[in-house]
Amino acid sequence: MADSLLQIVIENLQAFLQDELATILGVNSQIQELSGNLVAIHAVLQDAEEKQIRDRAVKLWLQNLSDAAHVLDDILDECSIQSNRLQSQHCLTPFHPMTIMFRRDIGKRMKEMVDRFRRIDEERKRFELRGTVPERQQQEDEAWRQTSSGTTEHHVYGRDQDIEKIVEFLSRSADRVDDLSVYPIVGMGGLGKTTLVGRVFKDSKVMEHFDLRIWVCVSTDFNTMKILNSIVESVSGHNPNLSTLEALQNKVQEILLGKRYLLVLDDVWSTEKWEDLKSVLLSGGGTKGSAILVTSRIESVASVMGTCPTHRLSPLSEDDNWLLFKYHAFGSNKVERTELVTIGKQIVKKCGGSPLASKALGSLLRNKQDEIQWLNVLESKLWDILEEDDIIVRALKISYFNLKLPLRRCFAFCAIFPEDFQMEKEQLIHLWMANGLIKSKGKLEIEDVGNEAWEEL
Ligand SMILES: Nc1ncnc2c1ncn2[C@@H]1O[C@H](COP(=O)(O)OP(=O)(O)OP(=O)(O)O)[C@@H](O)[C@H]1O
Ligand SMILES: [Mg+2]
């Protein structure tokens, strides 16, 4: 937050300097000093944002900085509006009374700003904040990123026994007495439930066994209409645009009629409406032997919905998690340097069998060539400080605070999307552009910068 604001203010200050307005208002030297201070502060923001988690003084300093930057930004805005107004009234000359009054007012407020930012800059020195990555490093990072982009191949490590067990259950679905078999899979966030079910969904035996395979991402809002809509959409390929429950119900039953189907309900959080959905599915349509796979983080959801014992997903074995980490950290065609492998294995140990944690940190280190950068992750104080957070949140925070500031902004921006929303690359890049989060860089067009940010995130 402070970063984007500061960047805008620095740009506005510099534009102000190039305009003769600063001279007319007699604030040239103040603007220069402010600009110098802000550039120095901006250089250490990345480090400050990380340190604020454990250092309250840094947090307060950042707040103070952000407040001051807002005030300064308002003053600059006011200057621009007022000068336009004076200009249109032909009063913007050094000796016009209106300009003199305006100059006195702005001069006083700018002086206050200079004092305020001087104090902020003095405080900055107390915190011993580190500057951003040197230019050489950034160039290396970018070169590596370019060779790595396009590696979207999706590997699933381990989980063979889980897959086998679920496929076996599904292939015997027709032998069971239940009208509808519901197989529940439970595990904490990021453990790989969706990935596992995705593999099962594409398993050749499963594809052969079922006439229809339907995937619905349920998420926190178990909305029967939405789920029925998704079922129709997933089978027919388009939204049925039916507004009543009854019409949708009929459509679903028509689609499922005489078919043996597999329905995946991914990421279920509540069972409040489960009975409604179940009765629609049971009151016609599919044949015996149809099955539902449910994934959830919540035990009680699994036990309410399941018609068989809950499948509790275990942490990924350390070996498999290392393979996953290695794939993301080194890519498929990169030399695995021994010293990095040693550190990497210790990082994976800290991930406690969470594939999401391992993937996040592996991907983060993909752009880092120096041993010290790997050690920074391994020895990050955030592992110990954030005790109340679980392993994944800690790993994700470490990964977040290791992103360069512009990327952090692009990432944080994605919070505007609802959970499980499928983002469109082009649309997201345009939103980043429209919100001023990315800019063209040297020879790179703004779209290319957006593309890079997308690849890296
Ligand atoms: N066995 C695996 N091999 C490779 N990557 C994996 C594996 N398991 C999980 N992942 C990766 O880890 C990340 C998290 O996995 P996934 O989304 O499947 O977790 P989840 O249990 O469904 O989490 P949530 O509860 O948040 O829905 C994904 O990016 C996925 O690609
Ligand atoms: Mg999931």
Image (tube, grey):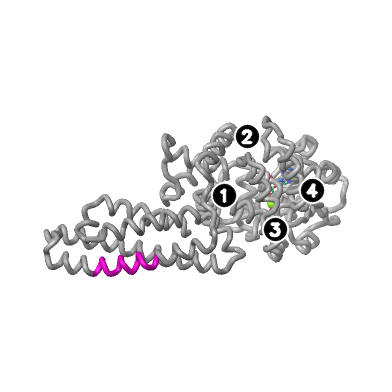
Within-10-Å neighbours for mark 2: few <14, some 14–19, many 20+: few
The residue that appears at 46% across and 56% down in the rendered structure is 3
Residue 277 in the image: x percent, y percent?
Answer: 69, 58
Work out which residue is located at the far top of the displayed protein and give it. Answer: 333
| Element marked by disc 3 | helix
Give the camera-side residue of 39 and 74.
Answer: 39
Which callout, 1 or 2, points at the residue further toward the start of the chain?
A: 2
Q: Is residue 148 visible?
A: yes
Q: Find numbered disc 1 in the image and state the secondary structure of the residue it sits on.
A: loop
Disc 2 marks a residue whose amino acid type is Thr
Q: Looking at the image, is mark 4 or mark 3 earlier in the sequence?
A: 4
Q: Nearer the viewer, mark 4 or mark 3?
A: 3
Residue carrying label 3: 383
Dot 3, crowdedness within 10 Å: few (<14), some or many (≥20)?
Answer: some
User: Is mark 4 in CB contact (under 8 Å) with mark 3?
Assistant: no
Q: Earlier in the sequence, mark 4 or mark 2?
A: 2
- Depth order, front residue of 407/304: 407
Q: Residues within 10 Å of mark 1 (few under 14, many from 20)?
A: some
Mark 1 and mark 4: Cα distance apart in space: 26 Å
Residue 106 lies in the magenta stretch: yes
Q: Secondary structure at mark 4?
A: loop
Q: Is residue 249 visible?
A: no
On the image, numbered disc 4 is attached to which residue?
A: 316
Distance of mark 1 from mark 2, alpha carbons? 20 Å
Q: Which residue is mark 1?
A: 403
Q: Earlier in the sequence, mark 3 or mark 2?
A: 2
Q: Which label belongs to residue 151?
A: 2
Mark 4 to mark 2 CA distance (whole Å): 23 Å
The location of residue 441, given as percent across then percent down, is 43, 40
Q: Main secondary structure of the magenta part?
A: helix
Amino acid at circle 1 = Leu
